[in-house]
Amino acid sequence: MHELSIATALARAAIDTAQAHGATRVLALRLKVGAFTDLDPEALRFGWEVIAGEERLLAGAELHIERVPAQVCCAACGYEGPARPPGVCCAACGSDCTRLLAGEELDLAEVELDVPEGGGGAEGPVGQ
Amino acid sequence: MSLKVEVEQKVLSANDRLAAALRERWQERGVFCLNLISSPGSGKTTLLERTLERLAGRVRAAVLVGDLQTENDARRLSQYGFPVRQIVTGGTCHLEARMIEQHLPAVDRPDLELLIIENVGNLVCPSSYDLGEDAKVVLLSTVEGDDKPLKYPGIFRRARAAVFTKVDLLGLTDFDIERAEEHARTINPEILTFRLSNRTGEGLDRWVAWLEGEIARKRAAR
């Protein structure tokens, strides 16, 4: 159940982002989870609800989880694109001489904030 | 007004930073650091006992062992003459870099050559937490499912080596070791594989030889 630790780290990052932009509330988070990142989305959602429920800025913030499929670059045939599931072999020629381009993510991609009109005391330009 | 901010940051970046600092320290000092990961009951502690037995008097090693509750493993491991420290996580299912940093002073010594970290018994959670190790090693015993590399690709992808334990029981279960190795290579074509039995000693020589080779290589690269 490391999902609770991950939810805690997400909350920290979301609060930091909200404060840097003078936001009054965090509306949503978009998380990228690679095919080779073992994580239980339901456990993470549960952890997120628990953690977010304790923070005024995060109350009601939605967590969107985006799965990122394995993407490879093939040294044998030059193919670049999705790997042949479930592993990292080339989907074109079957070679296992591939380099992983995507699939190991556990990244916070985007935070959606509610910012008062007029900047709300943002420390930097909007969209920074 | 709604504002979308592109963050694009690693969720565990705070842990990653601490792990990078540990890795730099091991690089400077030429210490090889191993992170052992498996389900509960795959034989991590027993493999460590057999390994420490063989390394006694040859390598200056230290052990950090994570467990949810008890100090039993540290007691078992402390009889081989190496400093051992139990990290009781109090329910947390994995070790984090800050725990390594915190408990390291209890076992560290200036001439250390090998630090072995035995992670909490869990195939999922520890795979996401970098501890600054040179190699993650995943254990899979022959009483588990041979499709586990496909079910838990995170750890098999990130592991340098997979150790298949309890091979003395092959034939008594439906575990197909060829298939298990093939699954591991599907996820990670470069993964090293070992077959061994802690009970009979089969395969231990090759495992210890690999470990000693890595220790020597790391020291030489200082």
Image (cartoon, coloured by chain):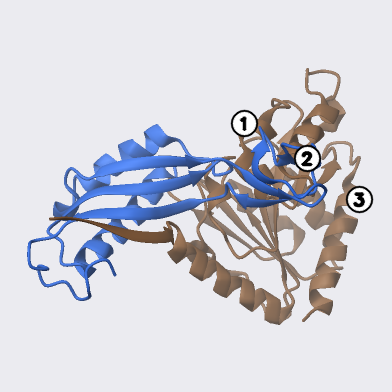
Chain colours: A blue, B brown
Residue bearing the label numbered 1: B151
Q: Is residue B192 left or right of residue A33?
A: right
Q: In the picture shown, does residue A54 fall above or below B140?
A: below
Residue B199 falls in image quadrant: top right
Q: Residue furthest left?
A: A117
Judging from the image, what secondary structure is the residue with disc 3 in?
helix
Pinpoint residue B4: horizontal percent, then vertical percent: 26, 56
Pinpoint residue B166: horizontal percent, then vertical percent: 80, 33
Q: CA distance from mark 1 to mark 3?
A: 27 Å
Q: Quadrant of the C terminus of chain B?
A: bottom right
| Residue type, mark 1 in image | Lys
Callout 1–callout 3 Cβ contact below 8 Å: no
Chain letter, disc 1 residue: B
Q: Quadrant of the N terminus of chain B?
A: bottom left
Pinpoint residue B8: horizontal percent, then vertical percent: 41, 59
Q: Which mark is residue B185?
A: 2
Residue drawn where x is 57% and y is 49% of the image: A104
Dot 2 alpha-carbon crowd within 10 angstroms: few under 14, some 14 to 19, many 20 or more: many
Q: Is residue B189 visible?
A: yes
Residue drawn where x is 85% and y is 29% of the image: B178
In this rendering, do the residues under marks 3 and 2 share a single chain?
A: yes
Residue bearing the label numbered 3: B206
| Residue type, mark 2 in image | Arg
Callout 3–callout 2 Cβ contact below 8 Å: no
Q: Is residue B36 left or right of residue B173?
A: left
Task: Work out whether mark 2 precedes mark 1 in sequence or the reverse, and give the earlier one.
Answer: 1
Q: In the picture shown, does residue A118 fall above or below A70?
A: below
| Residue type, mark 3 in image | Arg
Which of B182 and A117 lies nearest the eye of the viewer?
A117
Task: Work out whether mark 1 precedes mark 3 in sequence or the reverse, and give the earlier one.
Answer: 1
